[in-house]
Amino acid sequence: MQHPEILFEPLKLPCGVILKNRIAKSAMSDSLGDGTGHPSADQLRLYQRWAEGGLALAIIGEVQGTASYAEKPGNLVLNEASDLERFGDLARKGGANGAKLWLQLGHAGALAYAPTSAPKGPSALDLPGLRCAQMTADEIRQFPLEIARTARLARQAGFGGVQIHAAHGFLLSQFLSPLFNKRSDAYGGPIANRMRLLLEAIEAARAAVGPDFPIGVKLNSSDQLEGGLIEDEALEVVAALENTSVDLIDISGGTYFPGAKAASDGAGRGPYFIGFAKRARTVTSKPLMLTGGFKTRAQAEDALAGGAVDIVGLARALALVPSLADQWKAGRMLEPEFPRFSQAPEGGITAWYTMRLTGIGSDAETPAASDLHEAIQAYEARDRSRTDIWLRHFGGNATGEG
């Protein structure tokens, strides 16, 4: 191997926090909240196992500031009504062994889970499988305050940082995209306006947590949709982030809008967005993380050695091998074996990996050859059960009134 040690060099973030190596668990929607917005025992164990497995950073996907616009009924909800001790337990378990556990601050916008939400986005949409109302000016003004409040509580609970989610078609990604943002006010039109809400959210979060607490941003390199955010515009966002207090820019791509192609479609073998990361490096000195398509240790080493990125984001690889960081450090499991699924329905592979995470959290992970359709059925049944719990717990606040 040409670069055997590069994965295990520490990384100092602009705020002063040091990550012990260059391996991160990217945010995934693990759907392991208990339905009341709190972490479950399986979720605590899942993040503990990842921490024990040697990675430097893990990010919990889609942690909501309110119950109104969750992506799934298994999302976490962190606000003044939350039991902070239960979140503190998660922070401690996921922060073991020198790992840092960050919360990804989310708002699903038009993609909010319809059975528990009244979806809203930058503009009204009425499309097959996707309908939402337009956010009011006051709701937009409140959003950075909500991000700031959740970030402050994350620090209070003992988490190691936060990541503001502006990718994959969720709210801030929708604001960045000309396909979904048709506003004519200060938040619509040119990319300078469409990125305004993201920049305001970063500023509010920094004011809430102080100078020495990590704040990251997850950003699409493009929407991979005709008429959506393109790479040149995303590059303008990266350049603007250079002038903020952001500590880590996590590059990804694609959306979860119905019918949109997966990030892996046509991307070939290897990291999907490495070309954009190389372009981003020319306009920012901020640490860069790349998420999507890393399947081997050699790919991770090459991305770091080439200087395009500073830390690699792994998701499905760590769902298959929770201790992969330690395995790589010991020279083992250099190419994890990924399952292959034929004729998987839309969302089916995501469901399989989500249920795989459930198994890891219960110390009974399903074998890589386990049945796809059984996993989908279990995933959908759990969503139905958690929806009932969510609606009983949050009441009217879960339908867009909170």
Image (cartoon, rainbow, N blue to C red):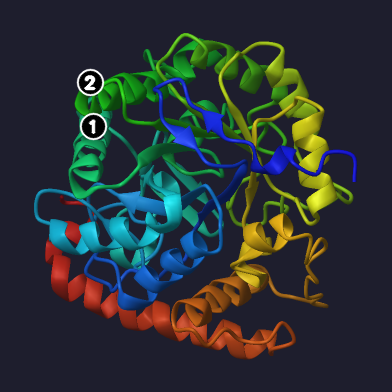
Q: Residue at x 37, y 15 (%)?
A: 185
As drawn, is 82 to the left or to the right of 294?
Answer: left
Position of 105 relative to 189 (above/below): below
* Viewer-side residue, 16 vs 169: 16
Position of 286 relative to 18 (above/below): above
Q: Residue at x 33, y 26 (%)?
A: 201
Query: Which residue is label 1 attached to?
Result: 148
- Residue at the left extreme, as displayed: 81
As drawn, is 117 to the left or to the right of 195?
Answer: left
**Residue 289 x, y percent position in the rendering:** 61, 35
Tell me which amino acid carries mark 1.
Answer: Ala
**Residue 254 x, y percent position in the rendering:** 66, 44
Which secondary structure, mark 2?
Answer: helix
Callouts 2 and 1 close, C-beta under 8 Å: yes
* Quarter where residue 318 is shown: bottom right
Query: Which residue is label 2 attached to?
Result: 207
Q: Residue at x 60, y 57 (%)?
A: 258
* Viewer-side residue, 176 vs 331: 331
Marks 2 and 1, the one that precedes in the sequence: 1
Tell me which amino acid carries mark 2.
Answer: Ala
Assess disc 2: are there few (<14), some (14-19) or many (≥20) residues with their C-alpha within 10 Å of its C-alpha: few
**Residue 31 x, y percent position in the rendering:** 42, 68
* Viewer-side residue, 17 vs 229: 17
